Image (cartoon, rainbow, N blue to C red):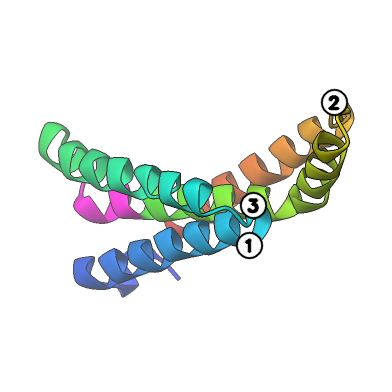
């Protein structure tokens, strides 16, 4: 599949679905209405960035939407992958202790998410 197979309107629908997946991941992992409300900031800023990217550069709107959608899906993937650690952090915080996620795990999550985003973007563009 490439970007030419979908129209601009269809890519906007994909970006809305990607935004919804980020909201669902945040709500599922944090179980906090405030965190879910704050997660609305990323899609809003992304939409403004897509519109600004389209106007400021000679790139197409579809390219910006692809990058935006893949970025949000990657972030949602990262949040879901870190859910077990978030639960440990929450449990330790309730008893007054702190829990730090091991650096190797953070680095592994980061590499996997960035690799996912780069591969998907290169496949689509």
Are the residues tagged 3 and 1 within 8 Å (C-beta)?
Answer: yes
Specify the segment rendered in magenta: 59-65
Q: Position of residue 9 (x, y in %)?
A: 20, 70
Residue that badge 3 annotates:
30
Please name whichever residue, 84 or 67, is drawn nearer the observer in this view of the structure: 84
Q: Is disc 1 placed on a helix, strand or loop?
A: helix
Q: Position of residue 45 (x, y in %)?
A: 30, 40
CA gap, disc 2 to disc 1?
A: 24 Å
Determine crowd level at label 1: few under 14, some 14-19, many 20+ residues with C-alpha closer than 10 A.
some
Residue that badge 1 annotates:
28
CA gap, disc 3 to disc 2?
A: 21 Å
Look at the picture and state if 6 lies above or below 106: below
Mark 3 or mark 2: whose residue is earlier in sequence: 3
Q: Which mark is residue 103?
A: 2
Q: Is residue 75 left or right of residue 81?
A: left
Principal SS element in the magenta part?
Answer: helix
Mark 2 or mark 1: whose residue is earlier in sequence: 1
Determine crowd level at label 3: few under 14, some 14-19, many 20+ residues with C-alpha closer than 10 A.
some
Q: Position of residue 125 (x, y in %)?
A: 41, 54
Specify whether residue 61 is painted magenta.
Answer: yes
Mark 2 vs mark 1: give the one in front: 1
- Return the residue found at the far left: 55
């Amino acid at each position: 599949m490439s970007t030419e197979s979908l129209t601009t309107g269809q890519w906007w629908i994909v970006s809305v679905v990607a935004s919804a997946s980020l909201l669902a991941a945040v709500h599922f992992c944090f179980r906090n209405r405030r965190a879910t409300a704050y997660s609305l900031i990323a899609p809003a800023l992304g939409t403004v960035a897509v519109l600004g990217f389209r106007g400021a550069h000679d790139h197409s709107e579809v390219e910006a939407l692809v990058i935006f959608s893949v970025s949000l899906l990657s972030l949602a993937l990262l949040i879901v992958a870190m859910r077990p650690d978030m639960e440990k952090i929450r449990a330790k915080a309730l008893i007054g202790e702190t829990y730090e996620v091991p650096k190797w795990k953070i680095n592994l999550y980061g590499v996997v998410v960035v690799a996912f985003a780069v591969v998907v973007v290169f496949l689509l563009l």
